[in-house]
Amino acid sequence: MRGAKGPAVRICSLLPSGTEIVCALGLGDHLVGVSDLCDYPLAVMQKPVVSRSLIDTAVLSSAEVEAKMRALQETGASPFHIETALLRQIRPDVVLTQDTCAICDPTADDVQQALVGLQPPPHMLVLRPRTVPEIFASILEVGQAAHAEAQARALVASLEARVHAVATRAAQATFHPRLLSLEGLTPLVAGGHWIPELKTLAGGRDELFSPGCAAQRLEWHTIRDYDPDMLLITPCSSGVQRSLDELQTLAAQEGWWDMQAVRQRAVYVIDHVYFSRPGPRIVDGLELLAQIVHPDLFHGAIPPDTVLKFALPAGDTCAPEALATHFQPYPAGARACKV
């Protein structure tokens, strides 16, 4: 890495979580490049785009995304295009990448190939957190690479204190419901990595998966037989509206209306960014989840336009294609989402 010191370090982040970490450290002005998936905070969308996804999840259905991914994998092609010429132009000192998911962001292998011949070679920092403590460790790694160790330690200490506060209060609950979260609907995918841990910290239970495990595809009968008390729908790379558009695939399944979560109307659609990005906002996601699981203990943690709750009158059913129309902003009185 070049001999840049302190705030002079030029950072290129090719994943949203890395970008959010950099900005949370107060180093947003030193971002010289991002990916087209980096959208928070909003100012980063004005940065040069170095990496672009070849699959537009904003316009394709989950089934169409799955088909395109399969086609690319069969040819050995990456689902991302990295602008190597732009990389040479912006000359970063540090490049942030990951190797947790080959679908969500460019992998370390993709980035390594793009950096071949770049002189002087930047420091490629591969972020690979799979648990909440590892997310915090990755923040410290970014801080070290950016010569912002003090800021990173302060940020992590603040985040750890918030996690401790949630876990301590949630432990006071007399009932810890069984939670199931879906990271994909077509195909059905259960959230892994830090997601099982978040459920426990928020005062729930996950009896299917352990912290750090990979996301796993599920058969419908596994979900039906598990019969969770609460069902959380948070498809990766999917906002609330897109998730709503695909809910009919669940309602069409055998036994949907007999599930405990459905009978109790404890089905929630949640913006994925609070769970799919292993950065500082994962703690926002924990606080949000804690309010969903234990609204008697937690308040004010759910931002507007973030969570919808199934609100069809108890005992009623509807056609699968009408299911999305029976979700309302949560908590009651929150600003309405566009549905």
Image (cartoon, rainbow, N blue to C red):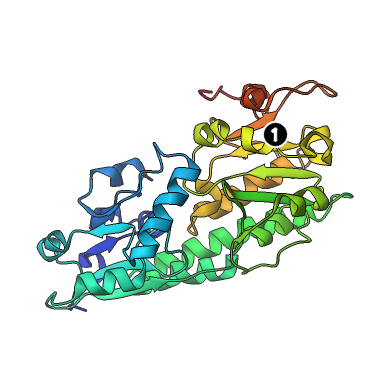
For label 1, the SS is helix
Q: Quadrant of residue 87?
A: bottom left
Q: Percent x, y for residue 246?
A: 56, 35
Report the label total.
1
Q: Residue at x 35, y 67 (%)?
A: 97
Q: Amino acid at mark 1?
A: Ala
| Nearer-the-camera pick, 299 or 18 | 18
Image quadrant in which the N terminus is located: bottom left
Q: Quadrant of residue 208?
A: bottom right
Relative to 317, is 185 on the left or the right? left
Relative to 82, is 255 on the left or the right? right
Q: Quadrant of residue 232?
A: top right
Q: Residue at x 76, y 51 (%)?
A: 221
| Nearer-the-camera pick, 261 or 119 | 261
Is the residue 210 above or below the residue 220 in the image?
Answer: below
Residue with the mark numbered 1: 251
Is the residue 329 above or below the residue 28 in the image?
Answer: above
Q: Percent x, y for residue 83?
A: 18, 59
Image quadrant in which the C terminus is located: top right
Relative to 288, is 169 on the left or the right? right
For residue 24, say whether it is visible: no
| Nearer-the-camera pick, 193 or 166 | 193
Relative to 90, is 283 on the left or the right? right
Q: Percent x, y for residue 199?
A: 70, 55
Q: Residue at x 61, y 56 (%)?
A: 191
Is the residue 239 above or below the residue 179 in the image?
Answer: above
For residue 62, say whether it is visible: yes
